[in-house]
Amino acid sequence: MDLYALTIAQAHDLLKRRDISALELTRAVLERIDAVEPRIRAFLTVTADQALADARNADAAMARGHMAPLTGIPIALKDVICTQGVRTTCGSRILENFIPPYDAFVVRRLKSQKAVLLGKLNMDEFAMGSTTEHSAFHTTRNPWNTDHIPGGSSGGSAAAAAAGMCLAALGSDTGGSIRQPASHCGVVGLKPTYGRVSRFGLVAFASSLDQIGPLARSVADCAWVLQAIAGHDGADATCAPDAVPDYGAALSQGVRGLRIGVPKAYFANQGLDADVCAAVLKAIDTLEGLGARIVEIDLPHTRYGVAAYYVIAPSEACSNLARYDGVRYGLRDEAAGELLEMYRNTRRQGFGPEVQRRILLGTYALSAGYYDAYYRKASQVRTLIMRDFSNAFARCDLIASPVTPAPAPRIGAHGDDPLAMYLSDIYTLSANLAGIPGIAVPCGLSQAGLPIGMQLLSGHFQEARLLAAAHAFEQATEFHKKKPELAP
């Protein structure tokens, strides 16, 4: 039995019956990291010693009768989530040596269940990218074909989950950064409703769009992790006080009687790959065969989503990233002779090209004389997109669509064309603009053997319904059982 290949539910049962120990499980996962990490490069920091100590603490807690769902489960974190005493780089040189003095809310939640934390995962710098090629440290590779990207910005999280280097991972999703890499790597990725999970300790990219969520090898595993991290946090003013339902219990509800909305315009997109289109349409047929009713819907303003997003997100980013000035923490140019020169040199040396591009875009959109023409107009479009979803959910319970227009491209394919990278989020970013939850679930393979995912969206705080539908589809198909052939 390859312990690293277990789902959370399988590992939990074995731990509960004392058939394995948390220490054995953790050692198996660390050995897997040693074996395949040189080829995948999903991690920025592996905290092996701390993970083994966590595992021993989990075994001791279980011996005392403490058995939470994630006790002893090895989990890794996207390196945009603060961890006390463990460096948090955000994939950027400007924070290369930054060690937070506190844990993020979600980290405290995982520690309270005695989960085992394996380390920090690679990402596009400050979560700005869709390929994980924009990390300042190295490019992560797709376990299904190491010549291809894993997606981004949570590419390290998706690749690690797919390659068996953790049983689950946390990522962040600002415009599709959980769902898109999950689709490219053949795992499940969930973006919760904005406000369902506290953002305290999540280093901000775009504060009105960012949300933390799980990536794992099954829908049930995502439900277990979401159960652990969801809930109100007074330290985050945008975190909702709504009660958290029992997501595990909701998995058995199925899709019978649910209305699945299908935006036909999404499938008429000229940029949609034929393999992706066929796989997602077949997946929708499967949902219909399970008892769902298919309803055609219209989301007329989502065609403007990319344009609106790439005004709003960079505008918030340029504001959030103003704090990295070389004065309080992070990189500082010590050779500068005066303050303004130090600011310029620090940010020029510390920020990569994609981050600099988005800071410039945001600064321009917010500048005097252009605010009304760009930021205000984009905010109005955002309201229209939210209204579209509200109208759609009056006619349906869920919306089904592709996650990405195409399977994972080769590394370097978008190197000179940032617009092509931006357009890869065309199906995902509208959910962030509207604040609704979405899930990516494996639904096929391309002719080249690369994973394809289906996206399901639901109304605000309807994660239970979303998970139930995704679980029903997963159990009716075999796609979640397929694994990358990644020999050590």
Image (cartoon, rainbow, N blue to C red):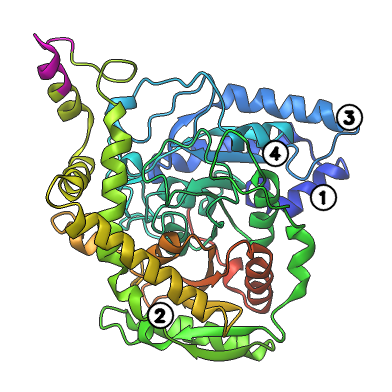
CA separation in Å, label 2 and label 3: 53 Å
Query: Which residue is under mark 1?
Result: 13
Between disc 4 and disc 1, whose residue precedes? 1
Between disc 3 and disc 1, whose residue precedes? 1
Query: Which residue is under mark 2?
Result: 299
Q: Secondary structure at mark 1?
A: helix
* Type of amino acid at the residue the image marks with label 4: Leu
In contact (CB < 8 Å): disc 3 and disc 1: no
Query: Which residue is under mark 4?
Result: 25
Q: Nearer the viewer, residue 49 or 39?
A: 49
Q: Could you tell whether 17 is left or right of 269 in the image? A: right
Between disc 3 and disc 4, whose residue precedes? 4
Q: Secondary structure at mark 3?
A: helix
Q: Is residue 410 visible?
A: no
Query: Which residue is under mark 3?
Result: 63
CA separation in Å, label 1 and label 2: 43 Å
